[in-house]
């Protein structure tokens, strides 16, 4: 019988997530509850990683708003060569660090940092795949996309995943990002974008 979906606690304390594929398939971990935390549901993650299956092995991954770390851990489990996760919440980062230790994973990096400040101020290295799942209603998605494109954080043909309250076509993301796939789960729109190396990165 299939495992029931695991959802965050509704009463504070701890939520739980399950890795659904790859080396650590079916491993379960807790994460601290926090305001604005929306762990990507199992069925959305499964769709996303089906989309990414041809591109994930050996990829360099960036997760600037990692939260529970569900997508970050999934990417490492499924063959990413390295992954960097950021979050402003010290408890979230500490929890993920324990998970990496438990998994004996040496190719995951974690930093407690504000994502926009990090992307603005740090020396960029190109990533093949970026997950953008920021807290809603805080005007974080578009500035993050613009910094990724304009500061040199993206590989020539990078893939970018977004979750948003609005239709992907209405987001005004860089003009050289092509919408590859999109779906909706409840009120959340999720999409995968393919970057071209075009110098024209003006918003679409």
Image: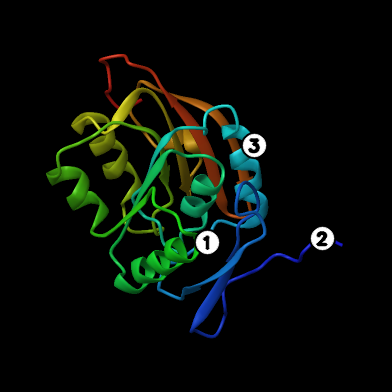
Residue 39 - label: 1
- How many numbered marks are there? 3
Identify which residue is drawn at 60% across, 40% down.
49
Decide which of tag 1 and tag 2 comes sooner along the chain: 2
Q: Position of residue 121 (x, y in %)?
A: 12, 45
Label 1 vs label 3: CA separation? 18 Å
Q: Residue at x 75, y 66 (%)?
A: 4
Most foreground residue, 150 or 63 = 63
Q: CA distance from mark 3 to mark 2?
A: 19 Å
Q: Which mark is residue 6?
A: none
Tell me the crowding category of disc 1: few under 14, some 14 to 19, or many 20 or more residues within 10 angstroms, Cα based: many
Element class at badge 2: loop
Q: Position of residue 112 (x, y in %)?
A: 26, 62
Q: Residues within 10 Å of mark 2 (few under 14, many from 20)?
A: few
Q: Which residue is mark 2?
A: 2
Secondary structure beneath dot 3 equals helix
- Mark 1–mark 2 distance (CA, rounded to whole Å): 20 Å
Q: Position of residue 148 (x, y in %)?
A: 27, 36
Q: Is residue 20 left or right of residue 11?
A: right
Of labels 1 and 3, the one closer to you: 3
Which corner quadrant holds the C terminus? top left
């Amino acid at each position: 019988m299939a495992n029931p979906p695991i959802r965050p606690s509704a009463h504070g304390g701890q939520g739980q997530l399950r890795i659904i594929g790859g080396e650590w398939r079916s491993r379960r971990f807790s994460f601290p509850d926090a305001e604005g935390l929306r762990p990507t549901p199992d069925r959305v993650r499964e769709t996303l990683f089906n989309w990414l299956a041809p591109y994930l092995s050996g990829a360099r991954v960036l997760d600037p708003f990692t939260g529970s770390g569900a997508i970050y851990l999934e990417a490492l489990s499924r063959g990413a060569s390295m992954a960097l996760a950021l979050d402003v919440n010290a408890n979230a980062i500490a929890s993920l660090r324990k998970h990496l230790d438990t998994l004996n994973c040496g190719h995951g990096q974690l930093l407690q940092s504000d994502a926009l400040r990090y992307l603005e101020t740090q020396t960029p290295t190109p990533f093949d795949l970026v997950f953008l799942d920021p807290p809603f209603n805080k005007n974080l998605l578009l500035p993050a996309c613009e910094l990724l494109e304009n500061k040199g954080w993206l590989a020539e043909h990078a893939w970018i995943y977004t979750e948003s309250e609005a239709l992907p076509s209405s987001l005004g993301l860089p003009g050289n990002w092509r919408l590859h796939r999109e779906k909706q789960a409840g009120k959340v729109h999720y999409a995968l974008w393919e970057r071209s190396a075009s110098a024209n990165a003006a918003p679409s």
